[in-house]
Image (spheres, rainbow, N blue to C red):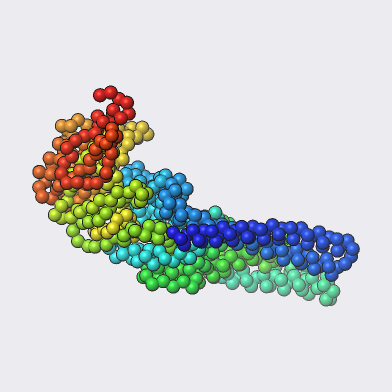
Amino acid sequence: MTVYHERHEARLADALRLRGAEKRMSLGRLAAIAAAILAATATIWLLTAAFTAAFFALVFLHDRTIRRRERAERGARFYQGGIERIEGTWPGKGLSGDRFRDDHHPYASDLDVFGHGSLFEMICRAATASGQSKLARWMSDPAHEVAEVVARQQAVTELRDHVDFREEMAVVAGEATAGLEEQQIAQWTAAEPVRFAAWERIVAIVLPLITLTVVFLAARPLLLLGPSLVPAWGLLIVLGLQAAFARTLGDRTTAVVAGVERAEPALGQLARILRVTDGRSFESPRLRAVVERIGGDAAREIEGLQKLVSLLDARRNQFFAPIGMLLLWSSNLAVLIERWRRRNGAALRQWIDSIAELEALSSLASFAYENPSFAMPVIEEGAPRFEAAELGHPLIPASRRIANDLRLDPTLRLLIISGSNMSGKSTFLRSTGVAAVLSFAGAPVCAKSLRITPMNIGASIRINDSIQEGSSRFYAEILRIRQILDLGREEKPLLFLLDEILHGTNSHDRRIGAGAVIRRLVESGGIGLVSTHDLALAEIVAVIGSHAANVHFEDHIENGKMLFDYRMREGVVQKSNALELMRSVGIEV
């Protein structure tokens, strides 16, 4: 994409220019401080003051230049990531999403949703943990409401061309992510409220005023204002009362202070991300709703809390500490901080979730922008349907991708796909499943067009044994099949994808077991694909009738080399390539 290349070069040029400015300012700082020392040695105080001021000015400018350079570098990385995705060099360079993997999920492992070179790695541009979790949830927990999916689609379509906003979102969130410990914020907002009674709040303000007055009256001789107007025992009584009152608030004050000090750095980072939405207006209802949830005061509210924390830090100053004790400084600020938490705790969680949603939508929008040939699917209510033209797999580079059409609906619920090894059967099943996952997440799909209804998804394509769980591959497969059958019993229709079903057992048991499973899935109202090497399974089409059909992928030998065209054809495959494959690797058969 020309825009990505141009902006990538521009950000790199900015970073290089700013790096040069950094070096010059660093040298300038050394020169300024050296000149200030020389001027002081010569007792030229005006020059000393001027050079010292210049030094501090350069310190400020140097720090700002560093931040601008880092931002330019993050912008360059944003566009570099987009270029790598377009050119197909992205695997292993993004977020794999391994922390979201679940081998017992009904389709995520089978469809390469998470892991190295996965769908998640290809799409995710979220920097915050909550943004990554939001996107992972959309990809692993299909939305079943048409209105929800359409709302996401509209937001993705609008953000697709808002390249500036997507860049700023990624850059600012990238700035924050190292310090944005969202779990700390969540723990702080969810902690039990700390109660300060109304009379305690009043006393915490009035008592320090009384104490300061008494101290002043007692200290008149020290201030050369005349004799003391308060006896020593009176001063001791007031100070004792204040100390006793401070003690009653001590544990609660400590709890409030400790909690906010843990959460405050992350809150400051969050405020910077929230600023990205300031002044933004969108057309799609979903984006407008997200911005409204954040509101115009979110960043200002957090910045108000930061000011309270800054005031709280003054208690550590050795000169202010005695005055702070007299003012019940920590306790009064703890009351204000706890009041802020009660007022904004729920909103704070809402702000984090809103940022997460913006990051997830921006990730899908970048995916749409970087794949302009992908179609936004039509999501509709009604009987189960999956009708795609030129369906391909997005993880396969466009130069090697072969597309096929697919139609599954109430009249044709099942396709039995036969074919030789490596001919494309499993890839076609995955292409179908991935298109459904992307559709329900609100993303475009690798197809010329797609009409689809909300469905559960169940896949048995990549099943492995488990030493830890003590299960064989066959046992793991039948557990997955039971899981898929359970999904088929739910109210929502099921899209099932079964690759080489029950191939871990003998052919007799396989035909009986596979036939029973397939019939039950079709009879429950599901639609799906079943691939097989066992041509006997193709006979199930005759049992099911007009709701099922046989299709196949095939290969051919050309100049002693086995070739595949990955095109789906009607009917049952008529040959196998197993022996040819064995001979091709040097096994005599």
Q: Position of residue 564 (x, y in %)?
A: 27, 41
Q: Quadrant of residue 550?
A: top left
Which residue sits at x=50%, y=67%? Answer: 276
Instruction: Check the image and name the residue furthest to the bottom.
Output: 225
Quadrant of the drawing holding the N terminus: bottom left
Q: Position of residue 87 (x, y in %)?
A: 43, 51
Residue 187 visible from this viewpoint: no
Q: Nearer the viewer, residue 478 or 377?
A: 377
Q: Position of residue 118 (x, y in %)?
A: 39, 47
Q: Quadrant of residue 422?
A: top left
User: Horizontally, is 281 left or right of 401 in the view?
Assistant: right
Q: Position of residue 64 (x, y in %)?
A: 64, 63
Q: Nearer the viewer, residue 167 or 148?
A: 167
With respect to residue 7, does 432 lie above or below? above
Quadrant of the drawing holding the C terminus: top left
User: Horizontally, is 157 left or right of 505 in the view?
Assistant: right
Please give the count of numbered marks on the rendered protein: 0
Which residue sits at x=28%, y=39%? Answer: 563
Q: Quadrant of residue 226?
A: bottom right
With respect to residue 444, does 215 lie above or below? below
Q: Nearer the viewer, residue 389 or 382?
A: 389
Instruction: Check the image and name the residue furthest to the right.
Output: 42
Q: Nearer the viewer, residue 537 or 560?
A: 560
Residue 8 visible from this viewpoint: yes
Instruction: Check the image and name the residue furthest to the front.
Output: 559
Which residue sits at x=73%, y=64%? Answer: 56
Which residue sits at x=74%, y=61%? Answer: 28
User: Horizontally, is 281 left or right of 518 in the view?
Assistant: right
